Every structure is written in structure tokens, then in C-alpha cells.
Image (tube, grey):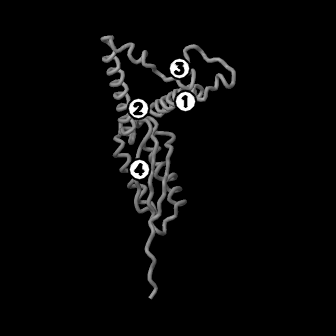
């Protein structure tokens, strides 16, 4: 859901910025007179000297009692929405729970951190893997995995990724009852010091 909200907000911000930029560009370069086309009467910038809000428009609502409370409320709403969006970005890091089909029609909830620990331990037991860091993402019924593998100097990246897919993720799919667990794997190899030959 958050990914969709991000796309919608980014799209809306892009449309607003492009429209505002086009309005400023058309007015500041005086393109309507140069190219011979007419703009709607409500167009904010008509000539290079025009401003968005003239002095008369800026002073028009100051005498109204509702003006400043409305401005402050609108700005406070914008700040609260921005804070909500920022907190939502920070919270989306890990999946807290995974739904496991118990086979009798009931769903069992498993803590995401427990499943991460099991997957990390099993990945670290593979040959050539020194350390594994597993992070669960996605939704409760459809988890996704992000894995960081640190290999020993003699470890093979191809063998480590193959073992992760064929064993660790296969066990995770079997134990959770999830048919498909997409994984993003990042592999890093520990460099060893050169040996001295005496």
C-alpha cells in the first residue's frame, strides 16, 4: 500500500511542478505573444513582469477573521501529512508477523524476527558462508526476503546463492505454507590477507 501511495504522491508532485514550471516559462519568455497563441483568462502569468499574487490579492483577505486561522490550519495539515509520510517510510523496514497456514483452516501468526533468526542460522550453516543477515519485507500473507551473505575467502557466490534458494528458502516455503517467497540477495566476500612465503 505504501508503495502505491509513494507513486501517487510522486506523480502528483511531478504534475504540479511541471504545470507550474510551464506557466512560469510561458509567462517569463512571453511565448504567447512570440508564437501567437492565446491563454485562458485565469492564467496566472500573462507577461514577463507578472507575479503569482499581486499586492491587491495579497492584501485582499487579511482583514477577514478566518484568513489567518485557515492559513495556519492548512500549513499544520501539510506538516502533519509530511510527518506521517516520513514515519511510514521509516516503519516499512521489516515485516513484524508472517501468516502461516496450519492446514486446518486456521492461520497461525509467526513473529518475523523469529523467522529471520531461523533463516539466518540456516544460511550461515551452509558451506562457505561466514555470516548471513535476513530481513523480511512485504505483507503478512506474502513475505519477501532480503538477504545479505558474507562469504569466507574460499566461498563460492554461485554455490551460496544456489544453496540459499534450494535449501533455506525451500524450507521457509514449506514451513510457512507460502508458495513463493521472492528474495533479493547481496553477496560480499571477505578478503583474506596474503600469506607470507618464507
Is 25 in front, or is 4?
Answer: 25
Numbered mark located on residue 59 in the image: none
Q: Are marks 4 and 3 in contact (CB under 8 Å)?
A: no
Q: Which residue is mark 1?
A: 21
Q: Residues within 10 Å of mark 3 (few under 14, many from 20)?
A: some
Q: Which residue is mark 3?
A: 44
The residue positioned 45% from the left and 30% from the top of the image is: 1
The residue positioned 42% from the left and 19% from the top of the image is: 55
Residue 155 vertical placement versus 36 (above, below) = below
Is 97 in front, or is 15?
Answer: 15
> Which tag, 3 or 1, sits closer to the chain's start?
1
Residues under labels 2 and 1: Cα distance? 59 Å
Q: Which residue is mark 4?
A: 134
Q: Position of residue 193 (x, y in %)?
A: 43, 74
Answer yes or no: is residue 108 visible: no
Q: Which residue is mark 2?
A: 104
Q: Position of residue 97 (x, y in %)?
A: 36, 38
Amino acid at each position: 500500500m505504501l508503495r502505491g501511495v509513494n507513486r501517487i504522491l510522486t506523480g502528483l508532485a511531478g504534475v504540479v511542478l511541471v504545470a507550474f514550471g510551464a506557466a512560469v516559462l510561458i509567462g517569463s519568455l512571453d511565448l504567447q505573444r512570440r508564437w501567437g497563441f492565446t491563454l485562458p483568462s485565469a492564467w496566472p502569468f500573462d507577461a514577463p513582469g507578472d507575479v503569482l499574487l499581486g499586492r491587491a490579492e495579497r492584501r485582499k483577505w487579511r482583514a477577514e477573521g478566518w484568513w489567518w486561522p485557515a492559513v495556519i490550519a492548512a500549513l499544520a495539515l501539510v506538516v502533519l501529512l509530511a510527518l506521517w509520510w516520513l514515519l511510514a517510510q521509516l516503519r516499512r523496514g521489516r515485516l513484524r508477523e508472517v501468516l502461516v497456514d496450519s492446514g486446518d483452516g486456521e492461520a497461525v501468526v509467526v513473529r518475523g524476527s523469529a523467522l529471520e533468526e531461523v533463516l539466518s542460522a540456516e544460511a550461515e550453516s551452509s558451506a562457505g558462508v561466514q555470516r548471513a543477515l535476513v530481513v523480511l519485507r512485504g505483507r503478512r500473507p506474502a513475505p519477501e526476503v532480503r538477504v545479505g551473505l558474507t562469504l569466507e575467502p574460499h566461498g563460492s557466490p554461485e554455490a551460496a546463492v544456489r544453496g540459499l534458494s534450494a535449501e533455506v528458502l525451500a524450507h521457509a516455503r514449506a514451513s510457512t505454507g507460502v508458495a513463493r517467497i521472492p528474495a533479493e540477495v547481496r553477496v560480499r566476500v571477505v578478503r583474506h590477507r596474503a600469506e607470507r612465503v618464507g
